[in-house]
Image: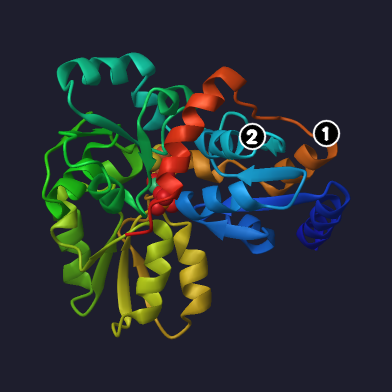
Amino acid sequence: MAMESLKREIRQLLLERRAVMLAHNYQRDEIQEIADHTGDSLGLSQIAAEADADVIVFCGVHFMAESASILSPEKTILLPRMEAGCPMADMITPDGVREMRERYPGGAVVAYVNTSAAVKAVSDVCCTSGNAVNVVMSLPADVEPAIMIPDQNLAKYVADQVDREVVWWDGYCPIHHQYTAQDVLEVKRAHPDAVFAAHPECRPEVLALADHITSTSGMYTFARDTDAKVIIVGTEQGVLYRMRKENPAKTFIPLSEDMICPNMKITTLEDVRDALVTMEPVVKVPEEIRVKAVKALERMLAVPRD
Ligand code: 13P
Ligand code: SF4
């Protein structure tokens, strides 16, 4: 009951503030339930760029709120918990990008959106798990190699899909990278009729066992369209909420009960309410960084989904 009145309070505050609430697919169930839009990193950045609102409450992690600030500098971007970060995004700095450029002078830097605004500002183009193959294919033919940062697993997956040279930074997502082929085989043994959908942040040996490799939003389409009745889900557990709601006749098995991103789960309804009341904490990318970073993000948004 207390939760229901909190949800009503948030919806009322959203109206009063002319605010839109965005939630990543990994957020807590109750946050996803009342958000105006849920989505993957690509979908949410498209919505952030187009939303007709004065305020965006971003329920996700810091780099996502930064992307919203880069694309919509006139809007107030609230990140209800400022400490919600992404350990993989912290694995590369602008100095790391410069190092890669020195090593590969003819290349173009393709920055996963899971990077800071400062890193985006020194990159050529961004990508997400939903468009990485098309972004790399969209690079001019004389650019060689594609320098993918910071996720080695996404880069190796893309390298497998494209007919051009790809090199990478050796970052990784601690949540996805911890699982091995052995873990997948154990779950498959327990569910022999299941299909396996995996996020490209998983290790190559895990992806080699997948029936489908896709972004978090791509997983919903796969869950709906597959004839299989049991689906093993190789990504953070937040996606299970909508998968189960939309497919009541199917069974969804997490690759592991521990596949949870603490940063994505830190934001509560109380935090969202407090952010809308106090209009804090605000994420605002400094203009000198923003004008450079926006080029990489806009170049990405011009490329279609994979
Ligand atoms: P998506 O872009 O697929 O939503 O992934 C974001 C992310 O942080 C995955 O760990
Ligand atoms: Fe970052 Fe991994 Fe969490 Fe995604 S799941 S926000 S990549 S730590």
Residue under numbered circle 1: 278
What residue do we see at 22% from left, 64% from top? 187
Which residue is located at x 62 percent, y 59 percent? Answer: 37
Position of residue 264 relative to residue 36, above or below, is above
Q: Quadrant of residue 199?
A: bottom left
Label 1: element kind: helix
Q: Nearer the viewer, residue 117 or 241?
A: 117
Q: Is residue 194 above or below residue 1?
A: below
Cα distance between the residues tagged 2 and 1: 13 Å
| Label 2: which secondary element | loop
Q: Nearer the viewer, residue 150 or 236?
A: 150
Image mark for residue 81: 2
User: Where is residue 119 shown, x and y percent of the image?
Assistant: 41, 24
The 10 Å Cα crowd at callout 2, few under 14, some 14 to 19, many 20 or more, is: many
The amino acid pointed to by label 1 is Thr
Q: Could you say which disc has been placed on residue 82 in the image?
A: none
> Which of these two is toward me, 171 or 270?
171
So how many labels did they put on this image? 2
Between discs 2 and 1, the one toward the N terminus: 2
Residue at 42%, 69% in the rendered image: 220
